Amino acid sequence: MTVPSISITLTGSGGSGVMTAGNLLLEAAGRAGWFGMMTRSAGPQIRGGEAAAMLRLSSIPVLVHKERYDILLGIDWKNADRFASEIPLGSDSLVIGHGEPPAVFADAAGQQFQLDLPAIAKTVPGGRANMVALGVAAALVGLPVTAVSQVIDKALGRKGEDAVSAGMAAVRAGMEAAKNLPRFDCLPVDSGAEADQRETRWNISGNEACGLGAVRGGIRFVAAYPITPATEVLEWLAPALPKLGGALVQAEDELASVTQIIGASFGGTPSLTATSGPGLALMMESIGLAVASETPIVVVDVMRGGPSTGIPTKSEQSDLNIALYGLHGDAPHLVLGPLTIADCVFTTQWSVVLAEKLQTAAIVLSDQALGQTRSVIPRQLDSGLVAQREVAKAPGADYQRYAITESGVSPMSLPGQSGGQYCADGLAHTVTGLPSSKAEDHHLQMDKRLHKLAQYDFGDHWAEIEGDARAETVVLTWGSSYGAASEAVAGLRAEGKKVRLIAVRLLSPVQPQRLAEALKGAARVLVVEQSHSGQFYRYLRAQYDINIPMRSMAVPGPLAIRPSDVSNLLNDWSGS
Amino acid sequence: MIATTEIDTSAGGCQLFEAKDYKSGVKPVWCPGCGDYGVLLALTKTLAELQLSPEQVSVISGIGCSSRIPAYLKTYGFHGVHGRALPLATGLKVSRPDQTVIVASGDGDGFSIGGNHFLHACRRNVNLTYIVMDNQLYGMTKGQASPTSAPDWEKGKLTPGGTGINPFHPLVIGLASGANFIARVSGTDANGAVPILKEAIEHPGFSLVHILSPCITYNREQLDWKKQVRKAPVEATSDPAQAARRLMTDDNLNLGVLYKGSRKPYQPALKMQIDNLDLLEAQFSV
């Protein structure tokens, strides 16, 4: 199955505004009734470096980029060759810009056209090259001018009428300039009446989606330390929380942000922080404190290339090991991974609810590919899951904070509750919280903390299962790799092949019975992930008893896994 | 934020609290003669002076001898990880401004591993009371030099010839970083400490109380502190420049309130009338 879609990259340097143009193009596509996604790539400069906005527009929701870009539109070509590996072109591709494009693009593309966008912009009073680029792109993909004009109104309206009319004049100049270029207008455009009846669509990034999921789940305190590519989770929450009666505090470092949320949660407020690999490494000691003291917290880790500083602006799924095994001691906790941008809403929300319910730490493994990609998706309805912590009722002299209960979860008293006073402790402790180094106390509390996770019924949300229920060929994946795996499986099935896909959302605690059930009848399992060492594959090998031939497809970042990578491997394996 | 109305805080009523009502009865791990006993006593007496219900008080600590104090109190408590008591307390106080939050620490926990948090807690000026029991060494790990050790103290087991480096001056640094109240008390004079601790708790914003708390196990010479300390010869100033001059020349033995500032405490407004989530979600609509 080939998803009908158009892929276009806008590139430029020196603060040319390609990200703005790309986002407006995406938003206009949403207005026209399309779906789509936009990935950003930028050079290492803080501002004004070369940048590329990579879009895929489609009439159905899309999760990954295509194998090739149809159009590469350059405001200029300065340093654009840095993006060569990220912008594959083919013989059908079109390169448009002024002057000689980098050879890597010129050699690959079937057609080249000269268009001097900055020069066209100069012919329009107040015109900007990125708005001309928007006009060219809109014309090439067949977007109606009304859709573009609506988003220009929305984006530039605040700057006044002059800005709007200058913006639109530049767009029209771009559309005019593009009129003799080949068209890629394969996508149907909604009529006005259809647009009125259409379900609401969102233009949202994965990081914003995590923020929304957090507040839907009941998060009302956030401590924040900026780090790429997680910062937007926190920046979205900063103005949102005060509107909901909550607060965000900017902390001095990640050691502080994680302990601040433990303090706030101790006080009874569902609390969260977001970070990326280096920050998560710093937080590990205190995540263990949350586990030992049974204080619920949620830590969103938006993964980037590692180790060490790695590649801050690009994606990788290589924090799985530290999230699963990074805590010292035996520290059972929750690890979850959203599969798509839309799923960032649900998985974060569910993680909040689970952490609060089970009084432990939850690590949510998003990544840069989800977090910083914008996507037009159907509006995500609220799952209605809200944090419900078991609070002690009228605690008295016999109150035990860490009492042994059937579920392993003990009612938690909150500061202010008379009779509920206890001292939360990272030291091994008795049922009342008193420090104890006795073997029996240590064993009892470790059993309790393991039991509360092991006995909990996580239900069907542990994974998404798609495709042919009894197919012999299975693709097993997690996190953002789901996008490529899902499109590959759909493509193979459209060719008549039997394939099923299991995408694990709940990584810890392990769900051996559920996975065994999902794998029934499988003859070969391809494990797809974006890491160098096959972290997910090795985790499956270590934690699950799978007696089926398994192969690891572990591809390190920063390049996204493409659906064809997955289907080619499956075809080779099934054919051999 | 949390609906504090849902917590039944009506108990307590008009009963009078005595110092013993704040003691948990757990036997401290401290050595006989440790200055921290005096701090524990002073703290319970102060809470009785203030007539705060035990459930209205949270005592937050890190790791070290002094950080053991929450378990010996009948208030709410959190004995966290090494060096992070201040951010733990910040998260609690900001989200639960109704609680009286006291942070207990030592010179290693507070000024070495937790040094960055100390600077930023002073700067942020959350309404906390930070009591630092300074014995100029690491006691729990059995006698190493700390940031406040004298450079020629040769008994530190990791620095046999002495550290050779100047000690950290917590009060000068606290003032420069923005602490809103600075005082020093002696752990061996509980009654003398009570009025100062009371004032520190009542003063808005971040209050730093430096406590000379001798460790007679690893540095017996600190027993002399009891004879050497004196009431500060001058009244507390509210002029930071004057306070800076005094603290820079301070010999670490002046007791009393040394600086009282009037900076506005940091406390985000926690709105009671809250917006509907739908309003937030509207921003995503295409």
Image: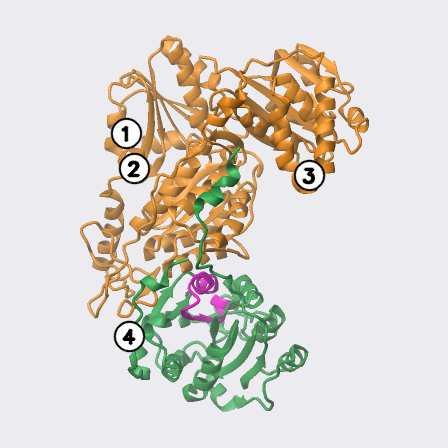
Q: Is residue A213 left or right of residue A102?
A: left
Marks 1 and 2 belong to one chain:
yes
Indicate the position of residue A132 as horizontal and vertical percent values.
72, 26
Q: Helix, strand, or loop for circle 4?
A: loop
Q: Nearer the viewer, residue A540 or A101?
A: A101
Range covered by the magenta-colored residues:
B82-110
**Residue A494 occupies which quadrant of the picture?**
top left
Marks 4 and 3 belong to one chain:
no
**Residue type at mark 2?**
Val
Chain identifier, orange in the render: A
Check residue A515 in the rendering and tell me which mark sits there, or answer none. Answer: 1
Q: Which residue is mark 3?
A: A45
Q: Is residue B106 found inside the magenta-colored segment of the image?
A: yes
Instruction: Say which chain tag 4 marks.
Output: B
Check residue A510 in the rendering and tell me which mark sits there, or answer none. Answer: 2
Instruction: Say which chain tag 3 marks.
Output: A
The answer to whether the residue labelled 1 contacts the one labelled 2, judged by CB atoms less than 8 Å apart, is yes
**Residue type at mark 4?**
Ser
Q: Which residue is mark 4?
A: B24
Check residue A373 in the rendering and tell me which mark sits there, or answer none. Answer: none
Bin the neighbour count of mark 2 within 10 Å (Cα to Cα): few under 14, some 14-19, many 20 and up: some
Q: Helix, strand, or loop for circle 3?
A: loop
Q: CA distance from mark 1 to mark 2?
A: 9 Å
Indicate the position of residue A8 as horizontal and vertical percent values.
61, 21
The residue that appears at 30% across and 72% down in the rendered structure is: B10
